[in-house]
């Protein structure tokens, strides 16, 4: 039985801990984490819905979106290159709804950076934060280094209107023969009275396909100008996981100073550049947990790659802008079209992921991207305008799971499909990664998704 004395002692401990927590004492982190575990987002399952392309220019490279909410408008800063012989620049678009965007113009160019005494040939990877009435724009510039080689490093520019940027300075410079020989793709965030800058860094002493070649490095600052390296963020999965390769891009979201979310793009196998986008959580910017796959390649516009998501949390849902590339080259510009797409994720009872949306599947068959399936129950859904009858040639819908020993996928079940009829299939098969293979009776238009819990 709990006595009045027990309750009094417990209340005294809680008050002491909260006082310690408020003023930064030894119990601060422990209590924050204890309370954080009660946050509704922790262990949440997400239903992801794509809205498709919200911005594109044929044959124009335009990625690395950094989206902020600024009063009644959204601002999206992106990298832009008109042709394969053009120089990269950073542009601004604005929107009232996050889906229809209007070009404002260039905000950072190579010429602007070099005009203040630097020697760069590329500017890219914007990340913006507004503090008071000042916009701080961090970006990568490929600068000539003292050892006579160009290397990526991080610059800062400021603005009072989010359009006209000036006061360009270098804030993070590379170190030769180190894990920071290239410093690129910055992201700026504020968390508990500190500013944090995360960057991808490259260790050129390692083979290009080594997952440790790219590391996510964390820097801390009190004034947004002077930065100190704090730690390496270890995010990569183990061999056989969906995120076992190199991390490319990331975006971090601060939820009421109680929880951090990171949305990150990573290779499923090191060296392939075949990426998925995942989500993880943290209480301290250093230690991340609960990794879940959120987006995989679904649309034809995503056929080559998806990457580089920017997130906001509004109205109880994650708003996600990300880049996608179909790999189709446009002769007039000498490059493929890199598009910005939009998706939303809401918390629910099931983790819901789209696998195909109106996908053209040839008679020889095709595979969905493999997905993270570390859930007890998986229900796959498929609808096709063509049938697929198991036992007739190679036809059928095949549930495939990753075979750890063989390092490849094997079929664990086969199902017939009736044309224009929804085919659901539930499996409890235990596998870290699974996918669908569909072989129709004739070329088909197919949609598929999976619900997991």
Image (spheres, helix red, strand yellow):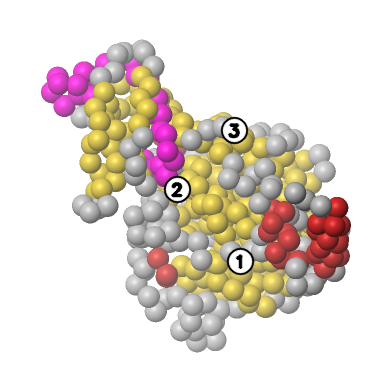
Residue designated by label 1: 286
Horizontal placement of 382 versus 68: left or right?
A: left
Q: Which of the 4 image quarters holds residue 218? A: bottom right
Asked if residue 64 is among those painted magenta in the image, a careful observer would answer no
Residue at 66% from the left image edge and 64% from the top image edge: 284
In space, the residues marked 2 and 3 are separated at their CA atoms by 21 Å
Range of magenta residues:
368-396
Residue 429 lies, in percent from the top left, at 33, 37
**Which of the two discs, 1 and 3, labels the residue nearer the N terminus?**
1
Residue at 64% from the left image edge and 63% from the top image edge: 285
Give whichever of 31, 359 is nearer the camera.
31
C-beta proximity under 8 Å, tags 1 and 3:
no
Q: In this rendering, does residue 71 appear at all?
A: yes
Give whichever of 125, 190 is nearer the camera.
190
**Which of the two discs, 2 and 3, labels the residue nearer the N terminus?**
2
Residue at 42% from the left image edge and 34% from the top image edge: 377
Residue 323 lies, in percent from the top left, at 52, 46
Residue 313's place in the image compared with 137, above or below, is: above
Horizontal placement of 40 versus 148: left or right?
A: right
**Which of the two discs, 1 and 2, labels the residue nearer the N terminus?**
2
Residue 449 lies, in percent from the top left, at 43, 29
In space, the residues marked 1 and 2 are separated at their CA atoms by 22 Å
Residue at 52% from the left image edge and 77% from the top image edge: 180
In space, the residues marked 1 and 3 are separated at their CA atoms by 27 Å
Residue designated by label 2: 276
Residue designated by label 3: 348
Q: In this rendering, does residue 273 appear at all?
A: no
């Amino acid at each position: 039985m709990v006595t009045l004395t027990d309750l009094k002692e417990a209340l005294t401990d809680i008050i002491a801990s909260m006082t310690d927590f408020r003023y930064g004492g030894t119990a601060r982190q422990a209590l924050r984490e204890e309370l954080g575990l009660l946050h509704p987002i922790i262990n949440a399952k997400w239903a992801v819905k794509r809205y498709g392309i919200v911005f594109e220019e044929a044959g124009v490279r335009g990625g690395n979106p950094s989206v902020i909410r600024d009063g009644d408008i959204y601002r999206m800063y992106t990298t832009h290159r008109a042709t394969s012989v053009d120089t990269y620049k950073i542009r601004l678009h604005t929107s009232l709804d996050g889906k229809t965007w209007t070009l404002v113009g260039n905000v950072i160019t190579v010429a602007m950076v070099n005009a203040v005494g630097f020697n760069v040939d590329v500017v890219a990877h914007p990340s913006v934060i507004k503090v008071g009435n000042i916009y701080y724009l961090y970006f990568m510039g490929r600068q000539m280094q003292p050892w006579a080689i160009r290397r990526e490093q991080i610059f800062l520019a400021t603005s009072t209107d989010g359009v006209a940027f000036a006061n360009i300075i270098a804030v993070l410079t590379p170190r030769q023969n180190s894990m920071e020989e290239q410093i690129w793709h910055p992201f700026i965030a504020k968390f508990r009275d500190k500013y944090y800058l995360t960057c991808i860094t490259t260790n050129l002493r390692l083979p290009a396909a080594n997952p440790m070649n790219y590391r996510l490095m964390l820097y801390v600052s009190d004034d947004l100008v002077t930065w100190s390296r704090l730690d390496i963020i270890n995010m990569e999965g183990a061999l056989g996981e969906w995120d076992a390769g190199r991390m490319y891009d990331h975006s971090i979201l601060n939820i009421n100073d109680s929880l951090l979310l990171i949305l990150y793009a990573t290779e499923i196998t090191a060296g392939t550049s075949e990426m998925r986008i995942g989500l993880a959580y943290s209480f301290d910017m250093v230690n991340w947990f609960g990794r879940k796959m959120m987006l995989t390649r679904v649309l034809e516009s995503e056929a080559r790659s998806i990457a580089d998501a920017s997130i906001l949390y509004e109205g109880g849902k994650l708003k996600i802008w990300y880049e996608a590339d179909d790999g189709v080259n446009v002769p007039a510009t000498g490059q493929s079209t890199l598009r910005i797409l939009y998706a939303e994720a809401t918390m629910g009872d099931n983790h819901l992921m789209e696998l195909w949306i109106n996908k053209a599947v040839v008679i020889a068959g095709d595979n969905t991207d493999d997905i993270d399936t570390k859930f007890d129950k998986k229900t796959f859904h498929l609808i096709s305008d063509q049938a697929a009858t198991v036992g007739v040639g190679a036809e059928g819908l095949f549930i495939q799971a990753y075979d750890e020993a063989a390092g490849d996928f094997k079929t664990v079940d086969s199902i017939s499909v009736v044309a224009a009829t929804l085919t659901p299939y539930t499996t409890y098969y235990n596998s870290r990664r699974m996918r669908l293979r569909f072989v129709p009776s004739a070329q088909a238009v197919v949609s598929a998704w999976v619900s997991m819990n």
